[in-house]
Amino acid sequence: MGAAAPSATFSSERGDLLSWLTTTDHKRIGILYLVTSLAYFGVAGALALTIRTQLSHPNNDLVSSHTYAQLFTLHGTAMIFLFVAPFALGLANFLIPLQIGAPDMAFPRLNATSYWMFLFGGFVIFAGAATNEGAAAAGWTSYVPLSAIAISTGLGQDLWIVGVFLVSVATILTSINFVTTVFVYRAPGMTMWRLPIFTWEMIATSLLIFMAFPTLASDLLLLFIDRRFGGHTFDPAHGGDALLWQHIFWFFGHPEVYVMILPYFGVISEIIPVFSRKPIFGYTGLVIAAFAIAGLSMGVWAHHMFTTGAVNDPFFSFVSLLIAVPTGVKFFNWIATMWGGSLTFPTPMLFAVGFLLNFLLGGITGVMIASPPIDFQAHESYFIVAHMHYVLGGGSLFAIFAALFFWWPKMFGHKLDERLGKWCFWLLLVGFNVTFFPMHFMGIEGMPRRVFTYESTGQLPLLNAIATAGSYVMLAGVLVFAWNVVVTTRRGMPAGDDPWGANSLEWTTTSPPPEFNFTVLPPIRSERPAYDARAKAAEA
Amino acid sequence: MLVGRRLFISSAAFGIVLAIAYWLVAHEISGAFLLGFMAFALTFLAGYMIVSEREADFWGDDRDAAHPDAEGNLLGTYTIRSPLPICAALAITMLVLGVVISPTLAIVSIIAILALGALFIVQSV
Amino acid sequence: MATTQSSVMVGNWQLYLVVGSVVAASVWGLILFAVVRYRRRGDAEPVQFANNYPLEIAWTLVPLGLVCWLFVYTYSAEASVETVAGTPAVSVHVNAYRWGWSFAYDGGPTVGGAAHGPILDSAKAPPPELVLPANETARLTLTSSDVNHSFWVPAFWFKRDAIPGQVTTFDVKPDQLGTFEGRCAAFCGLNHALMTFDVKVVSPQEFARWRSAEMHT
């Protein structure tokens, strides 16, 4: 192996602020994305706790209705645009060149520009809170006519529009970088069919971003022109169409949720084989399933509009039901990977199994609401809130923690503490399910979404109180994670190149990797180059 | 780059099928336009891959290649650090803020963006 | 379950719940079994199998068949729920606005009004009331005069969005007497949570009496 000393990438020698502000190194940019998105997660989580506290009992007056509207708008916007998606982009930024054996991304300066646009875009969105009429308060979906200038008169809504626009452009530029890098800069022997599943998922995600985010950007532009430049695209009183916003928005919005899960399918596909000591089962099936999901996801958008009575429900219902098939294929592949394996359960694997258990429920409720007769009751109720949080919280969030624990040593040279990691996992697993499982019943009982209070009827007070309690348990889990980071930063033990005995190429270089990633590359003859290198060394 | 070509061609074919199926089933103009435009964009990507990647020969595609095969090849000039990204992002952010709160800020930002663009071109030449 | 349409929808819920529970139990079962049965015991590397094409084809085709089968039931359930045919016994034009509901009966009274004050407590400010006759088809024509709202009666297992610039029509045939709570289910601003209404289903005779009393007020 190469004798070069581990690079000073993250050490104090080059840790000054200026080097971070001017970096174009994909590893540093990746870490910037992760830190920033986790910070936005903290903010969005605090907003969520405020929401849950307000809803802990009926007719609560912790916050006013107007404040509450800003809370859920910013919570949704931050979680979706500033946390779950950017975290994946940051992880991909760090990993893709390492996984394919490249020295950096294809366009390093563009890469850095995207990151700073994302950071500043978040500031612009939140800046609305400092304006006279407060931040945007029309929901993260910003439906017209509520978000039109006649009703949402404040600057907060405009700042939301341009902030999200900034983040969208950043996302599109990043995905261009990903696809170009993977197509052009693969190391010798790294054919497309030897790519790690995570990299494949990121290609599929990038394709979705190409199709979806420009659509969002144009919807935002049209809304902005309506609001500030006398446009009438969405204004029914002047020949416009209020429903058009929904069509264009969800044409973006549904692929967006797959942008928020496909990378994490990739994370799970990397972690399970390592801790099962078997290769990933059904590699080709997983790749094809990723693109099947991506392709089908472009054709389901109006299942968010079943209750408008203005869309062809059967078309969207059928395609939405179809998406369950490739998703199921992935599930069976992951289970088959564990099957007959030799399983160990360090924290990354705990979170991966937690992902499987949680996401399954979210997927099944998703199949249910693909049926319009079911959606007629569930739509815009807490049943939907339960579904979305099971896939995004129980799914993506758990995969995010799995990824953090798994790749932390590669990024920083030391592992996170295992005991604290297990506490974090169990607190999150219990807290998450206690918070969101009752919401299925709240929805069926008639509690709508986006309400700052509810009637004291039936089981609603009890279910809400339970959900609020669960959210505080989740807080404890997140705080344990933060403590874990603090404690190990000061006294973490060096991890070495490959602390887990893993499979993909990034584990053949040092932790953290040197400036241009590899001094020597092993021969790449399968999708498990690190495993092959270990096997070869053992033979010798 | 056979796999990439196949990927975009099958995506384009899928997009065309989806757009046609949607129009036939739903006769709804907004969705048909969105899907149709998407199919067009994917076809454009596929066409590009077919035409311009014909001669592509990446060592990553060679199943039996090893690291030494790539030695000595110049991939390009990698920047280690650059102030351009954060400045460009700041200028673009000021532009969108200016459009919302202050036309003066917007105009100043456009000048800044043009200046940065010129700097970028000068640096790359 | 208070309308003839809602029993179709509840049937659909039950179908999906049964199928979903079976799938969930099986897959959770497989995961938990694997987690316990294949725990690491000793250092031996497990057999490195990574493919089984017949199995992979099977677990693609079987779910595909399952969702197609579900779709057939779903399609027919929706078709029956959304049938708008024949002559209804009563037609009501429902208009949603910030923040209340107006119910304009064809040839009859226009009733309704604003939602509650700041506290959700029926005793303090009774919500606007839509009166319908039992066991007779009511045709509701829905729109909004400002932003998106949504007419949701949880007991009917049904909602329809009220979108400005658009008129949407649906039938309900209540088959239970009683008062059923209604909600707005599309975020419409400050008093969205307070924009409740009631649907009161009475006998046709009682309905006729109510209607003539209202028209003479």
Image (cartoon, coloured by chain):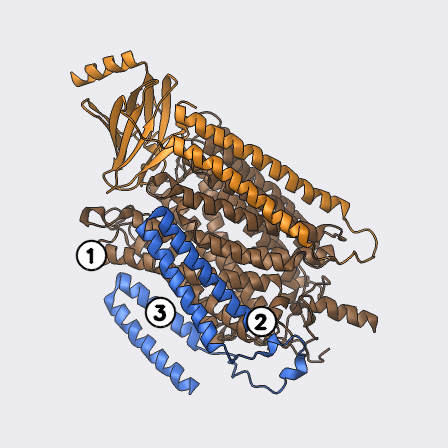
Chain colours: A brown, B blue, C orange
Q: Quick check: A253 above or below C116? A: below
Mark 1 element type: loop
Q: How far apart are marks 1 and 3 (CA)?
A: 24 Å
Q: In this view, does B32 lie to the left or right of A492?
A: left
Image x and y of residue A237, in percent: 19, 46
Instruction: Check disc 1 and give the amino acid type.
Output: Gly
Instruction: Check disc 2 and give the amino acid type.
Output: Pro
Q: Quick check: C17 above or below A9? A: above
Does label 1 lie on the same chain as label 2?
A: yes
Q: Mark 2 lies on which chain?
A: A
Q: Residue at x 56, y 55 (%)?
A: A289
Mark 2 element type: helix
Q: Is residue A160 left or right of residue C49?
A: left
Q: Can residue A310 be seen in this view?
A: yes
Image x and y of residue A497, in percent: 70, 69
Tell me the residue that label 3 is attached to.
B92
Tell me the residue that label 2 is attached to.
A97
> Which of disc 1 and disc 2 is earlier in sequence?
2
Q: How far apart are marks 2 and 1 (CA)?
A: 46 Å
* Front residue (pair B45, C111): B45
* Front residue (pair A200, A498): A200
Q: In the image, which disc is placed on residue B41? A: none
Mark 3 element type: helix
